[in-house]
Amino acid sequence: MEDDLSKNFAGAELESESSGSPSGRSKANPIYVSLCVILLAGVVVLGVLYVLSLRGGETKGYEKRWRTVMVEFQNRVEKDDKSAERYSENKDMTSLLRLANNRIEYFRDVIGRLLELTPPERYRKLHVLTAHYIFTLIDQLEAQKELNEALLEGKPTEDLSKIAESAKARAQQGLQELLIEMQKAGVTIETVEKKSKK
């Protein structure tokens, strides 16, 4: 299109130079100039619309990928929580420690997957709070793991117990902040229970 426009302008210039005006150049045809201006304005508008459509697609794409990661995360958390309850009831510290290690590794993998996403401005706070919440869960698991190891080895646990409780409170606070931001952004996560009711 730019080549066509340059050719048209060049053609107009040649026509004016070959005309019989005293100066060797004549004024460009007003209709021709108007058409060129309209054509250029149309190109600009189309460019703006194209950029806006890309931004819209980027927002929808991010939300879809974020939801995919978080639905899988939520399902895994619920499954592991049930296993943890069972191990606790049976006082199976060895299984609890193994589960904690597996969960920490998985949560770090989720953080890595989140960091691969580039959130549009609308979802930046949601993105940050999601990562923050998962980091607090990792801290909680590591604190609980240290407490369980001390219990297993018969070591003092008073300080470790306080640390674990503090880490748990921070994780709960992180979850509340994330849930509030999800509500503001109009984003929901379909859990295992909701799926099973369908």
Image: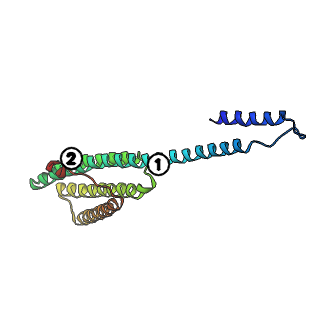
Instruction: State the residue at coordinates (17%, 52%).
Output: 193
Give the quarter of the image for residue 128.
Answer: bottom left
Q: Amino acid at mark 2?
A: Arg
On the image, the x and y values in percent for residue 153 come to 18, 55
Q: Which mark is residue 190?
A: none
Instruction: State the residue at coordinates (59%, 43%).
Output: 43
Element class at badge 1: helix
Residue lying furthest left in this view?
A: 90
Mark in front: 2 vs 1 = 1
Instruction: State the residue at coordinates (15%, 48%).
Output: 196
- Give me the C-alpha separation between circle 2 and circle 1: 44 Å
* Left or right of 116 on screen, residue 97: left
Element class at badge 2: helix
Of callouts 2 and 1, which one flags the residue occurring earlier in the amino acid sequence?
1
Q: Which residue is mark 1?
A: 55
* Left or right of 176 on screen, residue 87: left
Q: Which residue is mark 2?
A: 98
Front residue of 121/92: it is 121
Would you say residue 40 is visible in this rendering? Answer: yes
Instruction: State the residue at coordinates (82%, 41%).
Output: 26
Q: Amino acid at mark 1?
A: Arg
Would you say residue 93 is visible in this rendering? Answer: no
On the image, the x and y values in percent for residue 16 come to 81, 37
